[in-house]
Amino acid sequence: MNVKRASHRRYALALSLLALLVLPTAPAQAQQFERFGDIEAHYSAITTDFLPEEMARRLDIQRSPHQGLVSLSVRDADGQALNVATEGSVSVVGKPGETPLAFRTLREGDGISRYATFAIDTSAPMRFRLSLQLDRNASPEAVSFLKRFYRDQ
């Protein structure tokens, strides 16, 4: 991959994440999501070196190819952002143990996102398990996904 294409790809990914974190009520393009009735939970996981410097500073996140960021935004059928209690963990497929994720909340205008950082392991895909409390009178909903991280050579 040439340097110009890699730079363009990195910029596009940073913009996608920025949109997910800052504008969670905007229509999602490439993010992954789960639907629970009329509620959508959009999620993403990237390395923090994809974050623009200003965003990383604002969120107090170190930019590094060794640190990841998982983000989540939840919206109802009307596109309204929901403040959802979120817990989760991350593990490496094939290795024992899970690391809990400490989610923080980002509020921008009418948008609400939850995000957490974690150490990246490139030896195998990483499994994310999230628990979303969409209704305090019901059991939490589960979101699980795999993400493989690669190191640039």
Image (cartoon, rainbow, N blue to C red):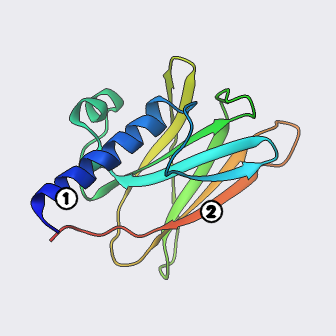
Q: Residue at x 22, y 35 (%)?
A: 53
Q: Name the residue under label 1.
A: 6
Mark 2 neighbour class, 10 Å CA radius: few under 14, some 14 to 19, many 20 or more: few
At label 2, the amino acid type is: Ser
Judge from the rendering whether residue 23 lies leftward or rightward of residue 46; answer left or right: right
Depth check, front residue: 63 or 29:
29
Q: Is mark 1 on a helix, strand or loop?
A: helix
Q: Residue at x 19, y 59 (%)?
A: 6
Mark 1 neighbour class, 10 Å CA radius: few under 14, some 14 to 19, many 20 or more: few
Assess whether mark 1 and mark 2 are in contact (beta carbons under 8 angstroms): no
At label 1, the amino acid type is: Ala
Q: Which residue occupies the extreme right position in the image?
A: 137
Q: Is residue 55 above or below residue 140?
A: above
Whether residue 11 is visible here, answered yes or no, is yes
Q: Where is residue 106 in the image (x, y as percent from the top left)?
A: 48, 28
CA–CA distance in space, label 2 to label 1: 29 Å
Q: Nearer the viewer, mark 2 or mark 1?
A: 1
